[in-house]
Image: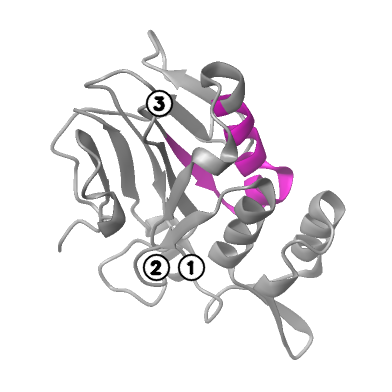
Amino acid sequence: MATLRNPAWAAITGLRHGFLPGRVEPSDTVLLPRQVHGTRVVDAPFGGERPEADGVVTATAGTFVGIVTADCVPILMVAPRARVAAAVHAGWRGAAAGITSVALARLRERFDIEPSEVEAALGPAIGPCCYEVGSEVRDAFTKTSGDTTAVAWTRHGTRDLLDLRGAVTALLRAAGVARIASIGPCTRCSADHCSYRRDGGEAGRQVSFIGWA
């Protein structure tokens, strides 16, 4: 099982990143937060206990940050000029609540990075083929972002199908991020990837990481 990478980032000197398939461990030490499906984004390195957060930013060489997923969208962000990178966990709750905007605001406030300077790669996540959701999910997106994610929704009988990566892409584009890539398959369809929707409590997790050597 090969690590998935964004080929467009191959020329960025010193950048290491990857979307690792289920139950594969990174070769480098990766700092992981305690994810809570929220919108908090923190800086790394962090001392002591792992913070509760769903995004981690690093500008420190040799510090790699990551998040774990099993259907949610792993977002890796990089600002090549400033040599700053971030790993963000976006389930539907976090995406609807604005985790992408919070991460971009953190990059602006801490490092003077505008969204137009940021490149994003979205790793394997559940696809619209498999993600049937209730009306409360669409309502949550509409409440916070209006029709921004309309392109990510299709109707199946009385239920909605959500393209979660499509919704995240729409939110990033609306915030000013122009360079966005989606990499990898639907996690529920892929035997090589962990899926909570498919396996329930028995599901493992995949790690997505990024940082500077």
Q: Secondary structure at mark 1?
A: loop
* Residue annotated with mark 2: 187
Cβ atoms under marks 1 and 2 closer than 8 Å = yes
Kindly state the secondary structure of the residue where label 3 is placed.
Answer: loop
Q: Give the magenta part as a residue range.
A: 86-107
State which tag comes first along the sequence, 3 or 2.
3
Q: Which mark is residue 16?
A: none
Quick check: 198 left or right of 148? left
**Which is nearer the N-term, disc 3 or disc 1?**
3
Label 1 belongs to which residue? 126
Q: Is residue 109 visible?
A: yes
In percent of the image, x 38 and y 31: which residue is there? Answer: 81
Disc 3 to disc 1: CB gap under 8 Å: no
Is 109 or 87 nearer to us in this picture? 109
Q: CA distance from mark 3 to mark 1?
A: 32 Å
Distance between mark 3 and mark 2 Cα atoms:
32 Å
Q: Residue at x 80, y 53 (%)?
A: 145
Q: Is residue 168 above or below residue 48?
A: below
What residue appears at the point 82 percent right and 49 percent down from the top-left corner? 144
Q: Earlier in the sequence, mark 1 or mark 2?
A: 1
The residue that label 3 is drawn on is: 82
Rendered view: 200 above or below 87: below
